Amino acid sequence: MNLDSFIAGLPKAELHIHIEGSLEPEMAFALARRNRVSIPFPTVEALRDAYSFSRLQDFLDIYYQGAQVLLTEEDFHDLALAYFDQAAADGVVHAEMFFDPQTHTARGVPFQVVADGLLAGMAAAKAKHGVSSKLILCFLRHLPEDDAFATLKAAEPWLDRIAGVGLDSSELGHPPENFARVFAAAGDIGLKRVAHAGEEGPPAYVVQALDVLHVDRLDHGNRALEDDALTARLAREAMTLTVCPLSNHKLCVVDDLADHPIARMLRLGLRATINSDDPAFFGGYINANYRAVTDLLTREDLITLARNSFLGSFLGPEDIARHVAAVDAFATRAK
Ligand code: HPA
Ligand code: ZN
C-alpha cells in the first residue's frame, strides 16, 4: 500500500480543530449571501489570496473577520457538518472540536445559537458518518479573565455537553497564569482543561499551562523543545501534544516543513499527535497535515501518531482501547 493510502486508511482522532477555522471561503460567501451581510473581498479567490501570514496575529485578524458571517443555528450546524464531511473522508472517527463563543457573543450572537447549532451538526455527523465528537469551549486570551468567567457562566445550561475548556488567540503577552482562576473553576465543575502554549510563547508559558492551569493536554507545545528538562517532564508525564504541521508552517512557527520537529518529538518520547488547527486557512485537513511531514517519519511513526490521537483523547478507556485496536488491525492488514 502506498504511503498516501496508508495515511488515508489509518483510523484517527482529531484533537486540535477550531471549528471557525474550518470556514472555507466558498462557505463564507454562501453564508454572507444567505444572511445578507457583506464580505470585504470581491471574490472567493481574493479571500483565499489574503490567507498569507507571517505570524499568529496576521491570521487571527482575518479569522475573526471571517467568523462574522456566522449568525444562525443553521450556520453553525452547516459549518460543523462541512468539517465532519471532510474529516470523515480523511479517516477521522472521533474529533474534539474547539469553538470560540466570545467571537460570536461579542457580535450579539447568543451563546445558545452557537452551542445548539454546533451540537446539531455533531449529531448529524454521528448519524451520517458514525464520527463521534466532543466540544471544547475556548477562552480568548487577549480578553480579560472576567470575560472568560462570563462565558463559563453563559455555558452553564450546556455543561453536560461540553467536555472541557481551552485557551486560544494571541499568545505573546497573554500568559496562561492570567487565567488561573477561571481554569480552577472549570476544573471544579469537572471539565477537562487544555491550553495553547509554546506556539509563539516561550517554554515558561508551557510550564504555566502545566502548573497553574493544570492542563490535561497541551495544544502545540513546539517551543517546549527549547528546554530539555521541560521536554523530559512532558515525556515522563505522557502529556499529549496536539501538533499542527501546516499551521506551524503558515504561521512561521517553523521556517521549513523539512525541519518540522514532529519526528524529534517522537524520538524524545513525547506523545505527539497530528492535527489541522484551522484547515480552511492553512491549506489542508488532517491527512494533508500527515502528508506534509511524512518524509520525516517511518510507517511505525504514523501508526504511533494515530494511536496517540486516541490515547490523548477524552474518550473513556473502553472507547480508547477499541480505537487503538482498530489502528493496530489496520496496520497489520496494510503491511
Ligand atoms: N493559535 C491561537 N489561537 C488560535 C489558533 C492558533 O493556532 N487557531 C485559532 N485560534
Ligand atoms: Zn489552535
Image: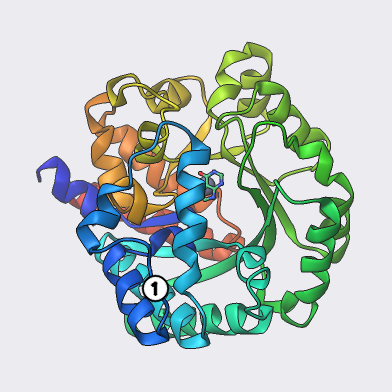
Ligand 1 under 8 Å from disc 1 Cβ: no
Q: Is residue 275 left or right of residue 313?
A: left
- The residue pinned by badge 1 equals 38
Q: Nearer the viewer, residue 47 or 103?
A: 47
Q: Position of residue 132 (x, y in %)?
A: 47, 72
Question: Quick one: SS at disc 1?
Answer: loop
Identified at 47% across, 40% down, the residue is 58
Please state, as top left, top right, bottom left or bottom right, where the C terminus lies in the image.
top left
Q: Which residue is at the front of the view, 216 or 259?
A: 259
Residue 157, compared with residue 262, is above or below; it is below
Residue beneath the point at 48% across and 59% down: 65
Residue 89 x %, y %: 25, 66
Residue at the image point whose x is 15% and y is 50% from the top:
5
Q: Identify whether 159 is placed above or below 74.
A: above
One can see residue 198 in this view: yes
* Location of residue 13 by image quarter: bottom left
Q: Position of residue 25 (x, y in %)?
A: 30, 63
